[in-house]
Structure formats: structure tokens, C-alpha cells
Image: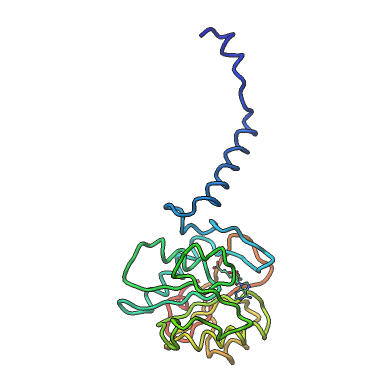
Amino acid sequence: MSDSEDDDIPRLSYHTLAALQEFYAEQKQQTSPGGDDKYNIGIIEENWQLSQFWYSQDTALRLAQEVVGAIGEGGRIACVSAPSVYQKLRELHREDFTVYIFEYDKRFAMYGEEFIFYDYNNPLDLPDKVVAHSFDIVIADPPYLSEECLRKTSETIKYLTRGKILLCTGAIMEEQAATLLGVKMCKFIPQHTRNLANEFRCYVNYDSGLDSAT
Ligand SMILES: C[S@@+](CC[C@H](N)C(=O)[O-])C[C@H]1O[C@@H](n2cnc3c(N)ncnc32)[C@H](O)[C@@H]1O
């Protein structure tokens, strides 16, 4: 083929090509979440109407490692309104624990049997298969920084846990968290994929590595 024929072939500009690639990548995420990407944080986009702010990869990994370290062999983990931690736990490809995702956003029903629909407004409205005090640790990140939301979520946490609690919420909730759940603030500071206006912290009711490092 001569140079002049080559020049006649229509080409997309760099920007159009980049936009197309981005479009196809988004389509792939939305239509075929069954592949290896299934547990990627961000495969389900944040919906700010639902107060969704995902953890950074590092924070999700740190929290996932923390809960695994806090339970014994074959332990059970409940992720309450903390879907990124569930995703990170499953991404670890470990089979030595059981984990459930308690979530209001039904897009997470893509995780099948491990998804449990949960609305903090009805804290104990849970399916029969969810037995009281059957989780070795509960990690929770309530959607709103209000006393009412924390109080109701605390009802769920206390129902689910056998003892250990890891709460992630605003620094301004420290006193209420201590009163409702007997948890204390850790030194570790969770990070999100976007900068949040409010200072976030982790709180625990057991000896945790999150308290020995920032
Ligand atoms: C502040 S975000 C915490 C997410 C966490 N940072 C993560 O990356 O996994 C609050 C979570 O509460 C969920 N949520 C929103 N409305 C809810 C409701 N009525 N009951 C329970 N959870 C709700 C959101 O879908 C979201 O996953």
C-alpha cells in the first residue's frame, strides 16, 4: 500500500480513542462483573446519594488484614455498610474465613449468597440465617454522622458480634461510639479514594494493631 492510500484510512484522534476506551471499560464493568475484576473496589461506582465513599486500596487492605488477624482459623466476619472491606477480603482469595456483606445498595447483590440486604433504619430486620452473636468480628462504617444512625447501627453490631467490633466513622462520633459500643479511637487514620471534608477514624474494643501505627 502506498503512503497516499495509507493516508486515506480514517483514524480516530487520540482524545476520541481515549474516550472510546474509557467507555468500553465502563461498559465491561457494568455488564460482566463475573470475571476476575468482580471484587475490585470501584467496580460499583460511588453513589453519593447513599453516602458512599470508598476506602483507598491501602486502607481497605489494612482493614481486611486487621479483621483476618483478629479472628481465629475458620472465623466469621460481618462487613456492615463497609463493602470495600468485603471486596478486599474476597480479593485475598483465602478460604479460611467466612464473610458476609450487609448492605443497603442492592447492586452488591452481585455477590450472591454472601450479600445480605440491610437498612440501618430496621437494625434487627435480618434473615433467619443470620444468627445472633455468630460473628467473631463486625466491621462497620455507618452511612451518616448522626447519633441516630450510629445508635441504630450499633444495635445491629451488638446483635451480630460475639465480641470484637471495628467501627469506622467520623472523629466527631468518638464520645457516642464509646457510650454505645465501648470502643476507643485508634491511631490509624483511614484514607478514602476522594478527600472527605470530615476527619475519619477507626475505633475498636480489643487490642488492635490499628492502635500502634498511623
Ligand atoms: C460511608 S459509606 C462506607 C463505605 C466504606 N468506606 C467502604 O469503602 O466500604 C456508607 C455505606 O452505607 C451504605 N448505606 C447507605 N444507606 C444505608 C442504609 N439505609 N442502611 C445501611 N447502609 C446504608 C452505603 O451504601 C455505603 O456502603
Horizontal side, residue 191 vs residue 213: left or right: right
Residue 212 on image: x %, y % = 45, 77
Horizontal side, residue 159 vs residue 51: left or right: left
> Which of the two residues, 175 or 165, is positioned nearer the viewer here?
165
> Which of the two residues, 132 or 163, is positioned nearer the viewer here?
132
Q: How many marks can you see?
A: 0
Residue 20 on image: x %, y % = 60, 37
Residue 190 on image: x %, y % = 54, 69
Report the residue at 67% width, 71% height from top.
198
Horizontal side, residue 212 vs residue 47: left or right: left
Q: Quadrant of ligand 1?
A: bottom right
132 w.r.t. 10: above or below: below
Q: How is colour applied across the structure in the image?
A: rainbow
> Which of the two residues, 130 or 26, is positioned nearer the viewer here?
130
Residue 65 on image: x %, y % = 40, 70
Occupied quadrant, residue 153: bottom right
Seen from this angle, which residue lies furthest front? 128
Report the residue at 30% width, 77% height from top.
73
> Which of the two residues, 36 or 192, is positioned nearer the viewer here?
36
